[in-house]
Amino acid sequence: MTNDIEFEYDDQTALPDLPMFATDPVIIGDVDNEVSRYGIGHRGSHSAGLLAAAGRHTESQRLETVPFTSPSSFASNRSELVRTDHQLVKRLTKEASEVLSRRKTRRAEEALNPELGVIAMTPDEEREMGRQIVMDLVSGEVQSAIDTGHEQLSVQQEQTLAKAVFDTLFGLGPLQPLVDDPNVENILINGDHVLVMYPDGSLETRPPIADSDEELYDWLTNLAQRAPGGGRPFSQVNPNLRLNLPGDIRLSAMGYSVRHPSIAIRMHRHKDVTIDKMVEMGVMPQLLAEILSAAVIGGASVVISGPMGSGKTTNLRALANCLPMQTRIGTAETEYELFLDKLDGREPYVVAAEAITGGGERNELTGALRGATTLSDILYQFVRMQLDRVIVGEVAGGEIIDMFKAMQMAKGSLSTTHAYTAAGAVDRLVTCALEAGVPTEYAYRQVAHHINIIIQLQTDYEFSANGERRQVRFVSEVIHIEAGENAMPAVSKIYDGRSDGTGEYGTLPPALLRKLYAGGFSPNQIPVNTIIGGER
């Protein structure tokens, strides 16, 4: 019986020599005996189409930009679809891995013989072969239940089981069903407690993705070893993990120093976002968007500050998109998050670089992991790249020195940091510089000389009449910084925002106006100062 329905999968996900998360294969018997061993030919007439449909999810569907809406019925139903027996999935995955490994080995051996005219298996062929193997294994489970009189899998269970096994072989394993929900923004895992967060801030509980902490550690270790750039360390010696997963998904994990593995996963749903979209979403008013856009185009160095989940990276992308399309931009990040190089039209003009953590051994003199490439190393190479703008994605510690370097080497820069007020962002940046080992006076001078604008984001919550909570993200404050007395930062408040996306404007200092005019702002756009005591 043949099946002409094909799966569609993320073509950006590179396949390993052995499928993801599978145990080492135990090769038993002859490859030609696989048909009888796995019950091929016993598949029910309805099975093939359902199992094929279980895997039909394209990259565009999975990462579609969605509006900030409440969870849909799709999200609620998803919790029922993922309740698959972990042990059964592991067993079928192991069996599928063994079959696939043998077939790959046989194909590779045949490719060594020029007379056969055979080439090594391509990734697409491997996925298709894996799909067929999974379908046959699950069909075998169905037939076995029928033959032995055990409880049969329902159509939904059969579909879910097939998808779970395929995801474990070629996708993100137990995480894949949660990632596939286009409305989920964050996945938060603490041992066997799993929560998904939606853009409006609401949370839903989901079933555990593993049967034990040990399984979670094995899963995280596997991900770390397979990360691009030679992998990333994750062990009791290096208990923290940060990396990107296929599909531009950010994972941060804490292990060993916590009671249970703690994992935070962020889906970047809003990639190709503009400053006008921020206005439409109520993050800022139109006039402020025009001021910030002109400032970025005019060469201002901007830091976007805010608490976790306030939209800093999204707003940074929006500001970067204000730059003319042919602007040469270099992005230096500890993990890829900006993805400016993936925006239509910008690909030829963006040099995107990510730090490499390095191996387990450390340099005896510096203590750095051998083989590591730091943000400083990247910026050193950026000097020869003929860049118009240099962006350091996030400043949470020693990256502050690299941010200062970026602001010195190009006309304007963009970065993000964590703080609850704009003034607090100044203190935060100075503290980061002090932790990096620079003197206090030098830290303040660098902030005063190289940072022009701090945009403060805030997250607020609104409650409906029936008590439902909705998250609101908005620009709460914008300040301008310049060198004042004794080269210390002199701060002027130029915007004071409210949660409804409106606000009051202060005086625009002459140093800022020069950059605004260079960025296309006109004098008749200057707002009236309605902030009392706008300078301090």
Image (spheres, grey):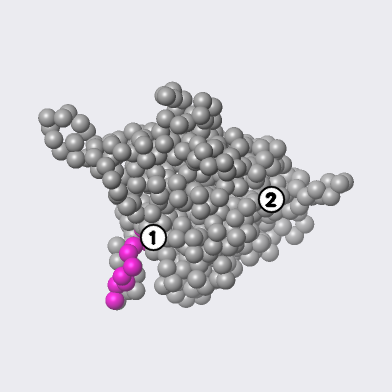
The image quarter containing residue 99 is top left
Where, quadrant-wise, is the C terminus in this rendering? bottom right
Per the image, the residue denoted by label 1 is 232
Q: What residue do we see at 59% from left, 34% from top?
A: 155
Hey, what amino acid is under mark 2?
Glu
Can the viewer see residue 525 in this picture? no
Secondary structure state at the residue bearing disc 2:
strand
Residue 335 versus residue 96 in the image, above or below: below
Residue 340 versus residue 40 in the image, above or below: below
The front one of 339 and 275 is 339
Residues at marks 1 and 2 touching, judged by CB atoms closer than 8 Å: no
Residue 270 versus residue 260 in the image, above or below: above
Q: What residue do we see at 42% from left, 24% from top?
A: 1
Per the image, the residue denoted by label 2 is 204
The front one of 351 and 115 is 115
Q: Position of residue 152 (x, y in %)?
A: 58, 40
